[in-house]
Amino acid sequence: MKPKHQRLILAIIAVIGLLVASLIAINALSDEASYFYTPATLNDQNVEIGKAIRLGGMVKQGSIQSASDGVTINFIVQDKDQEQIVRYTGVTPNLFVEGSGVVADGRLDKDGIFIADNLLAKHDENYVPRELQDIDMSNTQKLEKSVVQ
Amino acid sequence: MTAEAGLIALWLAAALALLQFAVSFLYIKTEDDNLLKIINPIAIVQGLLCLLSFTMLIFLFLDTDLSVLLVAQNSHIDKPWIFKLAGTWGNHEGSMLLWVSVLALSGAAIALFEKRLDQKTFAATLMVQAFVSFGFYAFLLFSSNPFARLNPAPKEGAGLNPLLQDIGLAFHPPTLYIGYVGLSIAFSVAVGGLISGKINSALARAMRPWALLAWIFLTLGIAAGSYWAYYELGWGGWWFWDPVENASLMPWIAATALLHSIAVMATRDALRSWTIILALVGFAMSMAGTFLVRSGILTSVHAFAVDPERGAFILALMIINVAGALLLYALRINQVRQGKIFNLMSREGAIVGNNIILVSILAIVFVGTLFPLFAEGFADQKISVGPPYFNKATIPFIFLLMILLWAGPLLRWRQDNAERISKKLLISAICAIILLLILVVTLPDTPILSMIAIALSLGLAVASFLPLMGRNLRRTPLPIYGMVIAHFGIAICAFGMASESGFSKQLLKSVEIGDTEQLANFDVKLKNVIPVIGDNWVATQAIIEVRDSDSRSIEFETLKPEQRLFFNPNQETSEAALMTRWNGQLYAVLGKKNEDGKWQLRIWWKPFVTWIWYGAIIISLGGLISLLGRTKRRKKKREEVNPWA
């Protein structure tokens, strides 16, 4: 075997290796990439129960309720005109407050409740989660202000 | 005047980079030795000027000179000095200046210490280094000037994000940057070799210590970042597959592959073009990481400012550098003679396997990190790719790599037979299988992946020492020890990861003061919750007493997790408390007070979690020993052929 042939063989092996890796990556992506929804898009589309998704919106004023175990909360995430009930067990992030933006990782259960595994709240005053940047919150904010008043 | 001095130094350094580029270019054309003599001094002075500029910025931050815009935006007079110091690189401009300083100092280091390259390749290397540096100087001067003044100066300053006010931050970015940007040397040497046309084992030997040094720092920097996220974010996780973490992992994977293929090229003069391409990919990944993190494309604690112009600038620099290098590669690679031939059942073959697996993992991480950006850019789809994808796609490859790692170091160069090593490997295989059986029988509820990973790690821990079997230990060269130790570190690290993922226990409960709960083998008592005051924060602190359940003694250790409220800027953070044992850590987070007066507590027992970072330290130590062996050997000027020489 000449060095030239060996180089060719190695290159072929490398290409096959990369192809296998890409196939695995594509397969895993189609199973595990979680799409981002707002309450409105979530209600519009039939999202499979138990599929990993992200939900983003505003935490509705007055909607946070603690369950009796003291570590589970139920709250409502809303966007312009739709709502979604979310349940989360755990210590909430510091900036998780009513009327503020939130992104929840989780899945829908069979009762239509969004079970959140993880909550991402607004990071600091100058930060809006990327997914929330272009959601129209104008109505919800007005709504909340009127509630507060 | 400090700010002006810093700015002038930066302009001068940029001018010198341009000069260095021109002089090196002329030398390559004319081979006039007079030109060669001045390249070194230029590179060294350029490095020093950039360092001077960075030092000036540090002074401004230590002084809290609020007439400088950057200081006013990111610091505050009431901050402890160590965070004023760390604040220098806790922002976009400062961290980019640090980045460029490391780049310039890398150039100076080549000028001072690199003696193995022939003159033409050496000049070409410094030419490439100057070219890359100049681009980033331009970026700083035209779009991210750290020394801009602010008039009128404010009285206090806006302060630093409290998440960044942490001792880990003082060390994590500089360490990571030395690693990141240190890879520029391998890049420059590779492109230098392409320019001079001398792609041979001497080039690989010259590249190796630099790649090794960068890789050591990269390893430590990633480990430090991971530990920082682990205790500072309060989520108890040590790796989130966050794009920013991936940005540091990708250069590391490329550098790891590079180190192995360099060994083949240096020792056996094979895998030439492959090694060159890996050197290019390594620094390309560093620049891609910088782009991802600094462009503001991602929102994270690292994205200091969202500014499309800056993102576009870095992207353009990256494309020019990488596309230029790849173009040169495509033009020149036909002139590179093919390397020496080898049998696939050999050390070379095993390293080819290592490289293919590592590059596959790199591809998977790359796709997962960039896919959401492409989906949003081209299809207007918001998609997040998280741990489920990365774990699912990378774990099979990691397992494969670990098995290969049992055998690879035992194989001889050029040609070997499987029978010879299979006897040795039997030991580690038996250990792994016995452990796997024990785990399956005693802990049937554990996730199977964790059990396999633990068994593979034990096998690897044994197998990593096998290359020393039958050797005269006194006469074994240091790089062999380095390899053994680094591979052993992988086993320790993988064991920690598998153990944490498979065996962690959690207590999440609303607890009354005075209550005792049980977690793993500990009795955990919430003794009290008290207010405390710090330098620039106030906090609610829980006092938690921890006892071993089975011990009768009254001795206990105390955990003190806090909810902190920082001033300037006003922000609440959660400070986790840790109790470290040799076999794991207790990790406590204090939640909110419920209406019934109970406190939310979240406590994890994470068995062997610290081994993840011990493993990383052992891996770097292996690298360091190997590096010492290389530099020592260079002094002795021995040119003997040796498995890892």
Image: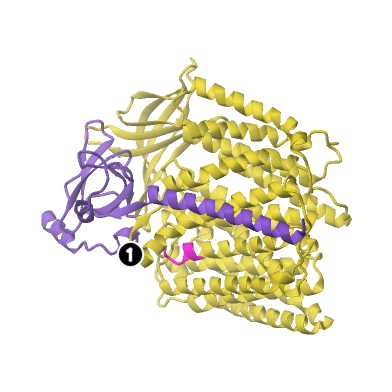
Residue B346, compared with residue B98, is above or below; it is above
Residue B352, compared with residue A135, is above or below; it is above
Q: Is residue B422 left or right of residue B380?
A: right
Front-lying residue, A108 or B633: A108
Quadrant housing residue B377: bottom left
Given the image, what chain letter belongs to the residue carrying mark 1? B
Span of residues in magenta: B291-297
Total number of numbered labels?
A: 1
**Residue B173 in magenta?**
no
Residue B175 location, x and y as percent? 60, 55
Quadrant housing residue B132: bottom right
Front-lying residue, B500 or B379: B379
Residue B560, compared with residue A146, is above or below; it is above
Q: Is residue B555 left or right of residue B484?
A: left
State the SS at label 1: loop
Residue B296 location, x and y as percent? 42, 65
Taking the spot 21% from the left edge, 61% from the top edge, the residue there is: A137
Taking the spot 64% from the left edge, 26% from the top edge, the residue there is: B431
Taking the spot 13% from the left edge, 54% from the top edge, the residue there is: A148
Residue A86 location, x and y as percent? 23, 44
Colour of the chain lettered B: yellow
Which residue is tagged 1?
Answer: B380
